[in-house]
Image (cartoon, rainbow, N blue to C red):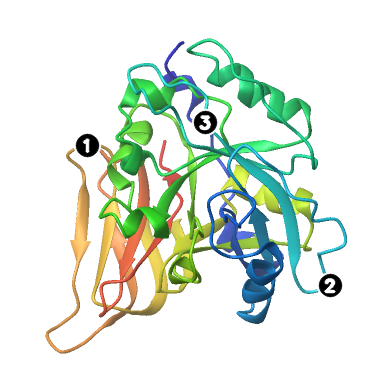
């Protein structure tokens, strides 16, 4: 397994400068098909009623027949969570496949076959997301070899119930090494308690499976468990951000670089205009609302 190189630092289009509309999605959900307590019909119905535009059903090592379950207003995506061996971690990886056909299966293999399994998902027409790396306790070298995943989970509601929901440190390790990987927030739904607590807002021209996967791959969106982000861009040497009322905004760059912006006492932030030091290589924002809920932008390259 080889680590990601500096030359792999990809530039993606800024979603806030793309044409299209915003869609709210959850890309990780389990049902009674595996270890969830919610039936397939109730899971889909719950997210549809809550106003979500897309839901991926990702039971462990098993798919569901979701043909005919999509509607004009909500797309239901066939998926599966799979667990190839992870060097140095007996429990293996947690990888989330999107857009695999019903009946798709991955046979057990020798240790170190995660790359081959990701390739098999891709060959079947799907793509893979790295699930809750902080909850899994993954080290840099255990993540960096998975160069064909299209995103990682920056927030996972189920993992948050076990005090390891946010994977900011793992995400930053990859960015600092030069891998411009994007992120999603998910519920990892197992029980009703998990529902509607972490989501991804995707900017797309239309609602389709291909559009969802492209938006995740290219970072055309942001992740949240509360706040809204209305704009995030770099212009004339400064970071400009607009958001719902915030108690703080954090700007994250490579190790040793970053900033915290606070409002005046008794006030909240709705926008910032922050001059970027020339030493920063990339920037992403974390918006924290007065309740402590967060939203995360994907990183923008400054190189």
Tell me where residue 118 sits by quadrant.
top right
Q: Is residue 191 left or right of 266 when viewed as pictured? A: right
Give the total of numbered labels.
Answer: 3
Q: CA distance from mark 1 to mark 3?
A: 31 Å
> Which residue is the site of mark 3?
83
Residue 80 at x, y percent in the picture: 64, 42
Which one is earlier in the sequence, the residue at label 3 or at label 2? 2
> Which residue is the site of mark 2?
72
Q: Is residue 221 at all visible to an observer of this figure?
A: yes
Residue 194 at x, y percent in the picture: 45, 66
Residue at image point 37% right, 32% down: 174
Q: CA distance from mark 3 to mark 2?
A: 33 Å
Q: Is residue 236 at all visible to an observer of this figure?
A: no
Closer mark to the observer between disc 3 and disc 2:
3
The kind of secondary structure element at disc 3 is loop
Residue at image point 57% right, 19% down: 115
Residue at image point 41% right, 27% down: 143
Residue 199 at x, y percent in the picture: 51, 64
Residue 274 versus residue 182: which sits nearer the camera? 182
Quarter of the image for the C terminus: give it: top left
> Which residue is the site of mark 1?
255
Q: Is residue 125 left or right of 177 when viewed as pictured? A: right
């Amino acid at each position: 397994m080889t680590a990601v190189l500096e030359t792999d630092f990809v530039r993606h289009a800024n979603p806030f400068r793309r044409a299209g509309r915003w869609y709210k999605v959850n890309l990780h959900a389990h049902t009674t098909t595996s270890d969830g307590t919610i039936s397939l019909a109730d899971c889909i119905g719950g997210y549809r009623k809550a106003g979500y535009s897309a839901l991926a059903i990702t039971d462990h090592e098993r798919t569901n027949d979701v043909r005919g379950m999509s509607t004009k207003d909500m797309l239901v995506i066939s998926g599966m969570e799979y667990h190839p061996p992870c060097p140095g971690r007996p429990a293996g990886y947690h990888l989330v496949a999107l857009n695999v056909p019903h009946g798709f299966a991955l046979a057990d293999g020798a240790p170190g076959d995660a790359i081959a399994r990701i390739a098999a998902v891709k060959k079947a027409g799907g793509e893979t997301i790295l699930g809750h790396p902080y909850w899994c306790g993954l080290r840099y070298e255990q993540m960096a070899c998975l160069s064909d995943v299209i995103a990682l989970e920056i927030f996972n509601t189920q993992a948050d119930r076990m005090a390891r929901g946010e994977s900011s440190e793992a995400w930053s390790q990859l960015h600092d090494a030069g891998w411009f990987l994007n992120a999603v927030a998910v519920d990892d739904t197992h029980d009703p308690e998990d529902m509607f607590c972490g989501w991804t807002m995707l900017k797309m021209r239309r609602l389709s499976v291909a559009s969802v996967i492209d938006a995740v791959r290219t970072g055309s969106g942001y992740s949240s468990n509360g706040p809204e982000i209305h704009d995030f861009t770099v212009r004339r040497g400064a970071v400009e951000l607009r958001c719902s009322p915030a108690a703080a905004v954090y700007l994250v760059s490579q190790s040793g670089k970053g900033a915290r912006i606070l409002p005046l006492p008794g006030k909240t932030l709705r926008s910032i205009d922050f001059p970027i030091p020339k030493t920063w290589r990339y920037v992403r924002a974390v918006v924290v609302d007065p309740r402590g809920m967060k939203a995360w932008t994907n990183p923008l390259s400054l190189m």
